[in-house]
Image: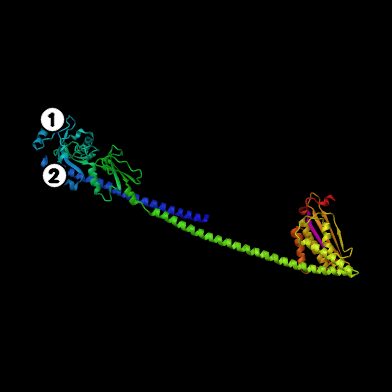
Amino acid sequence: MWRALMIFFAAVFVALLAAWDAHVSARKAAAANFDSISDKIVISIGEKMEAYEQVLRGGVSLFDAFGPISRKQWSAYVRGLKLAENYPGVQGVGYAVVINDDKVDDLERSVHAEGVPSFRVYPRGKRELNTAILYLEPLDWRNQRALGFDMYSEEVRRVAMERARTTGRPALSGGVTLRQETENDVQRGVLLYIPVFEPSSDATAPGGTGRKLKGFVYSAFRMRDLMSRVLERTDSYSPNLVRVEIFDGPNASAEALLYDSASAGNRAPIAADSQYLQERKLPVHGITWDVRLTSMSEFERVEASTVPMWMVAAGLVLGGLAATLFGLISMGREAAHLVADRLALEVETRKVAEERVRVALRELAHRVKNTLTIVTAIATQTVRHSESLDEFDQKFRARLLGLSRVHDLLTSGRSYSTDLAVLAQDVLAPYQGDYDGALSIDGPPVVLTPNTAIMLSMLFNELATNATKYGAWSNKMGRVALAWQIEGAADEKEILNISWRERDGPPVSTPSRQGFGSNVIKFSVERSLRGKAEADFAPKGVTYRITIPWSEIAPETDVSKGA
């Protein structure tokens, strides 16, 4: 299952990488689109402000061409401009005359005579330069409030007017509150000035140097009205997509705010989650506006790509399917392996069982054959040494009972512990016949563990069987000598040496093949007792030399050491 989980997490990881790459690409594309929209907005604002300059230059040209202009002529000029259609956002186009302090009363009487009885110059005072708004069209109720105002008396306006007078070029003021404003719907405003000089002045002088200032042609702009009209005519702009803020000068502070497309006049806080922001410096008629553009939630929603989300979902689905499929295949394969292993184990178990059955049958056949041969040999030997039928019957029965006891020892499976000499006598007695010298046993007392006793009884039984069938006990005069001894110091490894020697039997020759009896001997000595059995098939009689590591199989208490 951990492999399936690795496949799932790998698929999810790849999907997350692809989704992140798609997200980054989408963000870059959205940022590029936002930059493009921002460029269009800033360029449109700059172009519109340049276009409004031409309105004022037309008014300056009137004064240059015709000299003094009457109120009706100025009104006709402004009406011909069709401000509402061609220059939306312009509050008014006017002319402010430069007047000496002692001529103010004469100016007021002259304007009253023209049918404007409410005209007055304000605020009064002795200054370096005195001005008064003489003409202002269209002359609606708002603009009437500004007639007669001395703009040179206010610092922000005065700075722009001085710059226009000195350079002879259009000059835009900083943010002000226009005289046209009332208590309702107050907006920040700016004014654009172009100086008007006397025709008789030295026209070769740069700017306004050496020229007599006659007045100023100017325009008043209410910033929200102006910028709303400008942005409405800008391609790709929507108030739901982009928030536009314009600040007076490079300091983007609340006090310097001229326009905010997202508020009704007061600066609204920037959304904390706005993802895109652009700040541009826009030179406008001698000053610099700081234009800040931020993305709105609608823009981010439109530009947001669903591809990353679908990639993650696809990664989860495909990863889950791949992991599930792999898991099912792995589980099926594992189940198949388990079934195969179980079948292989059953086959192996059956093979082992069959092999054991075959070995058991072979051993049974071998023992039955040996038993019949031994019974025949015992009967032959008994006949040779019996004087009567009754004696034969008595001796034959006793020897068969002895043989039976040997087989009981080999097949009972009971725990058996005895002295080696006693064991040898019990096992070999049925085979030796009536000849007193047929068997000699010699060796020190040795106590055997149950397993060692069983293995040695099998060994002695097999050696006696072979001697009865083919060896020394197959004739009347044969004899067998069994001897043993333990060699080695107490602090070293001790060895039990056993010698089986046959003499006076038929001539002996080396067997051409290894029979079942030889396998029993090897099994008893080499495999079970971890010893070694060597046979010498000399013509005068076979000899077996058996060595067993006694220190490894000896019981804890050995009577041989106490003897």
Q: Earlier in the sequence, mark 2 or mark 1?
A: 2
**Real-space Cα distance between discs 2 and 1?**
30 Å
Say few, some or many: other residues with alpha carbon within 10 Å of mark 1 (under 14 / 14 to 19 / 20 or more): few
Q: Nearer the viewer, residue 494 or 30?
A: 494
Residue 77 — which label?
Answer: 2
Tell me what residue is drawn at x 14 percent, y 45 percent: 79
Residue 279 place in picture, x, y as percent: 32, 43
Tell me what residue is drawn at x 32 percent, y 49 percent: 299
Q: Nearer the viewer, residue 124 or 215?
A: 124
Viewer can see residue 103: no
Three-letter code, disc 2: Tyr
Q: Quadrant of residue 211?
A: top left
Segment colored magenta: 543-550
Most frequent secondary structure within the magenta stretch? strand
Viewer can see residue 8: yes
The answer to whether mark 2 and mark 1 are in CB contact below 8 A is: no
**Pointer 1: what residue?**
102
Q: Quadrant of residue 464?
A: bottom right
Residue 173 place in picture, x, y as percent: 23, 38
Q: Is residue 23 left or right of residue 86?
A: right
Residue 538 place in picture, x, y as percent: 84, 66
Q: Quadrant of residue 512?
A: bottom right
